[in-house]
Amino acid sequence: MHAQDTTALEAGFQATVAADQRIEPRDWMPDAYRASLIRQIAQHAHSEIIGMQPEGNWILRAPSLRRKAILLAKVQDEAGHGLYLYAAAETLGVDREELTEKLIGSRQKYSSIFNYPALSFADIGVIGWLVDGAAICNQVPLCRCSYGPYARAMIRICKEESFHQRQGYELLLSMVKGTDAQRLMVQESVDRWWWPSLMMFGPPDGDSPNTLQSMEWGIKRHTNDELRQRFVDMAVPQAEVLGVTLPDPDLRWNPERGSYDYGEPDWAEFKAVLKGSGPCNSERLARRRRAHENGAWVREAAMAYAAKQAGRAGQADGTGQADRALDPANEEATV
Ligand code: BYC
């Protein structure tokens, strides 16, 4: 392609982003934009899938049928989010199988938060309140991301995340109205999840290599620190209603800024978790790897079925329409 053509395409891309319109899969985009989106969307999809593990571990131990049904629905939602996101990544020319191989080979990241264990049932409430609460703060702006398929996936995901956050908060409200032991359980859980939740927003702005470019491209709309602050300001009054203490002695209202000041997360711990040394990194990946291996027969059967269908279609005169219409499996597939 001539340099002149590329310049015109680049200008078209920049104009679309500047006008706050969406880039679609058929549109020209810079290679680096494509690569950065694949990086972020893949990491996001992996987080949803790995994120099923800490809560999934409590489904069989939920204390009532109602709590079990809610938790089951939530964990299923996370699987759905992962699938929307893998589908969004595929529009950029990567294959889901390839992304899964990168995840289980530790060549792509997933959110640091899922490398912490869920040790009590209060953790189910706190994950909903703080982890899903942080996810909402981070993800609502992504509904306006410049890449159409990602932005549209985020709209559906955010609606469900909002239900997730509420179910967590409602669970905690029930627990804090219960016995002293339940209140202690909630406080102990908040103490463990508060700092890791703040780390979900990523490194401080000064140490975030991707933010500036991502914001120029309209992928990210706010910096990591801006969203972290928004989350703190949202969580503090909610903690007051619950009657729990957030484990940060530096947390106080700053009337000049109109926001809460808060302490510094332990960034050495964050880096260690990203490098694979968190409390559950190896367990999470081993479980994901096992699930992938155990599902191999399903993928093989689906591929064999698709090949058989394609073969039959090829045999039919010209179009293969007759064979497809006669096959009852096709009726099922289109329902
Ligand atoms: N954990 O330059 P930066 C959920 C990486 S799941 C791990 O600031 P960026 C849920 C970052 O990737 C919600 N890695 O990056 C599911 C980069 O590494 P690479 C998950 C992190 O992209 C189940 C490096 O550090 N949400 O809600 O500008 C149950 C430098 O960072 C983390 C998303 O994925 C981290 N916390 O900003 C319940 C949201 N932070 O790639 C709930 C989508 C940073 O250069 N993602 N890194 O090797 C984003 O919004 C952005 O990618 C981030 C990071 C804010 C996370």
Image (cartoon, rainbow, N blue to C red):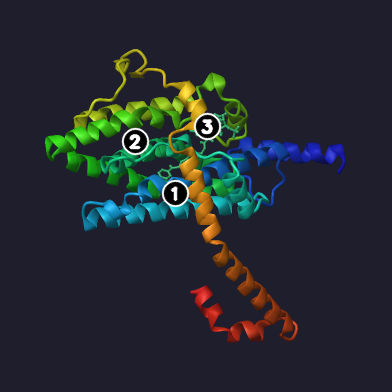
Local packing at callout 3 (Cα closer than 10 Å; few below 14, some 14-19, many 20+) is some
When the figure is inspected, residue 246 is found, relative to residue 323, above or below; the finding is above
Residue 184 lies, in percent from the top left, at: 19, 32
- Residue 75 visible in the snapshot: yes
Please give left or right for residue 219 compared with residue 11 in the image.
Answer: left
Q: Nearer the viewer, mark 1 or mark 3?
A: 3
At horizontal 85% and vertical 37% (from top left) the residue drawn is 3
- Residue 223 visible in the snapshot: no
- Identify the residue position indicated by label 2 in the image: 130
Q: Which mark is residue 157?
A: 1
Q: Secondary structure at mark 1?
A: helix
Q: CA distance from mark 2 to mark 1?
A: 17 Å
Q: CA distance from mark 3 to mark 2?
A: 20 Å
Cβ of disc 2 within 8 Å of ligand 1? no
Q: CA distance from mark 1 to mark 3?
A: 25 Å
Callout 1 amino acid: Ile
Q: Nearer the viewer, mark 2 or mark 1?
A: 2
- Identify the residue position indicated by label 3 in the image: 274
Q: Quadrant of residue 316?
A: bottom right
Callout 3 amino acid: Leu
Please give left or right for residue 134 compared with residue 61 in the image.
Answer: right
Residue 98 lies, in percent from the top left, at: 64, 51
Q: Nearer the viewer, mark 3 or mark 2?
A: 3
At horizontal 64% and vertical 77% (from top left) the residue drawn is 309
Along the polypeptide, which appears first: circle 1 or circle 3? Answer: 1
Please give left or right for residue 32 compared with residue 240 in the image.
Answer: right
At horizontal 74% and vertical 37% (from top left) the residue drawn is 10
Task: Using the image as rendered, state which of residue 199 and residue 217 is in the foreground.
Answer: 199
Cβ of disc 3 within 8 Å of ligand 1? yes
